[in-house]
Amino acid sequence: MGNLLRALYITNAVNTDWEEVCKDDNGDFYIGDFGNNLNNRTDLKIVIVPNPSVIIGDSVAAQIINFSYPDQVAFPPHDSLKNFDMEAMFWFNDSLYLFSKNRTVPYNGYTKMYKLPSQPGSYVAQLTDSFFTGVGNLINNSITSATISSTGDKMLLISNTQGWLFSGFAGDNFFNGNVFDFSFGGTQTQKEGAAFINNGEVYFTDERLFSTGGNLYGYDFSTVVGSEHLSQTMNEFKVSPNPTGNTLRISFRFPFTKISALKILNSKGEEVFKLGNIDMNDAFFYEVNSRSFLNGVYFVQLFTSKGYFLKRLTVIH
């Protein structure tokens, strides 16, 4: 049981549905009041709390960011468009990045990334990108928290059952680098928080429900690939050329790693290519004839004994 160090009361903000908290390099905190299960809210906001170390007393008047989404026109929208719930956010380079918790029916497997200034005011969020987490369901694939390393070179999204670690990206093009997918395993619980404690280790929390959850967990990514750095592993997974036209070359090389399957999915999560029963160690190279692929975004999945790796691919003929 931890000890309560301090209670700080925010005098000008009501908790409608606070879902995520993060802080910037100055120690200021951002509280995301953007939980939106029904996708019908028009009062979305982020509460800015100054660095508690400079606050005298036990109360503070926060600054407020009010915002809306550029692609939402109905409150609530049609079931197939219900992707405006939000539970994940982090601060990076003077901006806030928000990741949607997908509630579409039927489930389409995408989280949307929005960008906002980290200054008080009223804004329309910028929709900057999206990422396909899978065709399963809300419980397994919808995003519940996000965090970025202090060095800004690793970003993590989590759901209740798994996580996606991104690296090798430039600036805030988080989804255009390398992706490593991993499972939490064990009893399924409602994961709600994640934070890097250094460049390789992350803490997770889950909500307590009846007799499960209510715990703090640690995950050391260096153990995923033994003594080597995870970024080195993912840099050895290559998809070229990208964008591609008629021929796609896929290669992977890492010692003591067993490669078992290769899949390519289109933007709807439909399997357009599969190579199974590979059962080979250390090195893999394969050429795929992509002439029949329609123009658009695809996801190349490589399944190995060290985990499931993914790269996004663009096909242009």
Image: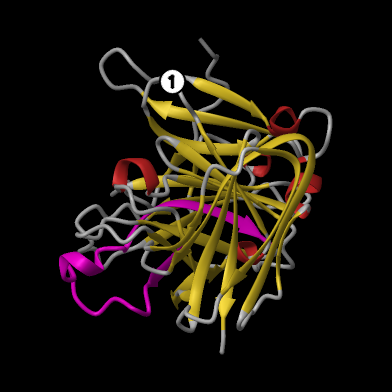
Residue 157: image location, x then y, percent: 53, 48
From which residue to which does the magenta span run? 64-92
Tell me if 214 is positioned left or right of 76 in this view: right
Dot 1: what SS? loop
- Residue 31, can we see it? yes
47 versus 215 height, above or below: below
Residue 2: image location, x then y, percent: 54, 14
- Residue 129, can we see it? no
29 versus 5 height, above or below: below
Residue 306: which quarter of the image?
A: top right
Tell me if 312 is positioned left or right of 154 in this view: left
Q: What is the three-letter code of the residue carrying label 1?
A: Gly
Q: Which of 40 and 265 is in front in this view?
A: 265
> Which residue in the protein does label 1 denote?
186
Q: Which of 207 and 55 is in front in this view?
A: 207
Residue under the image location 34 percent in, 16 percent down = 212
Residue 191: image location, x then y, percent: 42, 33
- Rate crowding at label 1 as few (under 14), some (14 to 19) or many (20 or more) other CA atoms within 10 Å: few
In the image, is residue 228 part of the stretch drawn in magenta? Answer: no
Residue under the image location 43 percent in, 68 percent down = 266
Q: Quadrant of the C terminus?
A: bottom right
58 versus 149 height, above or below: above
Tell me if 187 is positioned left or right of 4 in this view: left
Number of marks in the image?
1
Q: Which of 158 and 37 is in front in this view?
A: 158
